[in-house]
Amino acid sequence: MLAFGMIGVAGYVAPRHMRAIKAIDGEMKVAFDPNDSVGTIDSYFPEADFFAEFERFARHLDNLRHRGEKLDWMSICSPNYLHDAHCRFSLRSGADVICEKPIVLNPWNLDALAKEQQATGGRIFTIMQLRLHPLIERLKAQVDASRGKTFNVDLTYITPRGRWYHASWKGNEEKSGGIGTNIGIHLFDALIHIFGLPMANVVHLRDPNRAAGMLITQQASIRWFLSIDRSDLPAGCKSSTLRSIVIDGEELDLSDGFADLHTRSYEEIIAGRGFGLETTRPSIELATRLRRARLEPHRGDWHPFVARHLSNMVRIPCARNKEVIGADSAAGVGANKQFA
C-alpha cells in the first residue's frame, strides 16, 4: 500500500485528493495545515496523524524516515505561492510529489524545481485534470486528425465566488497569480494541449474579477473570457457555473464529467503517465505573460462577453487571424517580442 502525506489538508480541493488516494488503495499517513478545521479527514483517513505546526510536521517526517517508514508520495494542496517551497521540501523528505495546479506561478520556478528533482532523484507531477475529460480527449483526437486546420474558438469560464475570495490569498495576485493563473491555468493548458503552442496573444480586459483576450495558437484563434463575478452569467443560465467551448460555432458543454477527474489523475500518475514539469511549462509561461501584458482592448477580436465592460472603447475591426496581433507564423513560445 502506498503511503501518502498531504500539505494543505484543510483546503478546498483537499477532499478530492483524499478521495483519489482512497480510490487507488493508498493510505494518507500524515497531514499538515495551519488551519485545524480538518474534520473531513475522518471520512477518509481517521487514523492519519495531523499537525498544525510545520516544524512538528517536518520532525515527524524525519522520524518516519529514520524508522524506514518514509512516505511514497506527498500531495500538495496549499496556496499557489507555496507550491514551489512545498515541492522542494517534499522531495528533500524523500517523497515523490503530486501538486495541485498551478504547480508554480512563474516559469523560472520550474527551472529551479527541475534542478531539485535531479539532485534528489524525486519526481513531481501536477493535476491537469481537463486533459482527462472525455470531451477534451475526443476533441484532441479530432484536431489531431484535421491535418493542420485552423479553428475559431470561444472559451467562456464563469465560476462565481463570494466576497471571501478577495479577502483570502486567492484575491492577492502575488499569492494566487490572479484570475488567469488561479482560475485559468488548467483551461489554458487544455487549449494548448488541443490546439498547439501559443504564437501570440493580446489582453483586452483584466481586473480583480475577470480577464479576457485573444490567443493565437498553432491551430486556433481563441477568444477567451474568465470571470468569478456572478453578474457575468448570461440571463437565463440555469447553472451556477458556465464552462463552455465553442468551436467553429459548435458548443461543447464542459459542465459535466468533472466528478472523478482527480481520481483518474492519480491513477495515471501511479501508472507512470502523469504530467511532469515540462508538460506544464507552456501554460505557466502563457499565464505569466497574460498577467504581465499591457492591456490592448483596441487590438484583436473581442470575446462576446467583453463588450459590456468596454462599451466606451473604440475598437479597430479585424479578422480573427494571427496578423492582427502581430504574430510570426513561424514563432514558438517565447519568440514574439510582446511575450517579453
Image (cartoon, grey):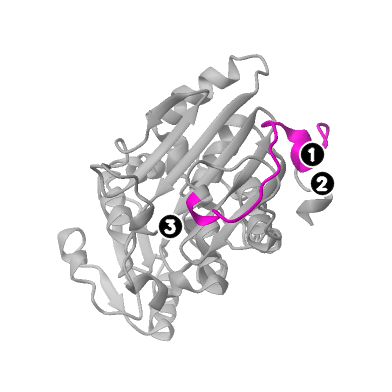
Can I make out residue 273 in this image? Answer: no
Q: Disc 3 or disc 2, which is closer to the eye?
A: 2
- The amino acid marked with disc number 3 is Trp
Give the x, y percent position of residue 6: 37, 65
Q: Nearer the viewer, mark 1 or mark 3?
A: 1
Tag in front: 1 or 2: 1
The residue positioned 25% from the left and 50% from the top of the image is 22
User: Looking at the image, which is closer to me, 14 or 179?
Assistant: 179
The mark nearer the N terminus, 1 or 3, is: 3
The label on residue 327 is 1
Across and down, in percent, residue 113 comes to 64, 61
Image mark for residue 292? none
What type is the residue that disc 2 sits on?
Asn
State how far apart marks 1 and 2 are (Cα): 7 Å
Q: Foreground residue, 211 or 34?
A: 211
Residue at image position (71%, 43%) is 316
* Residue type at the position of mark 1: Ala
Residue, disc 2 = 336
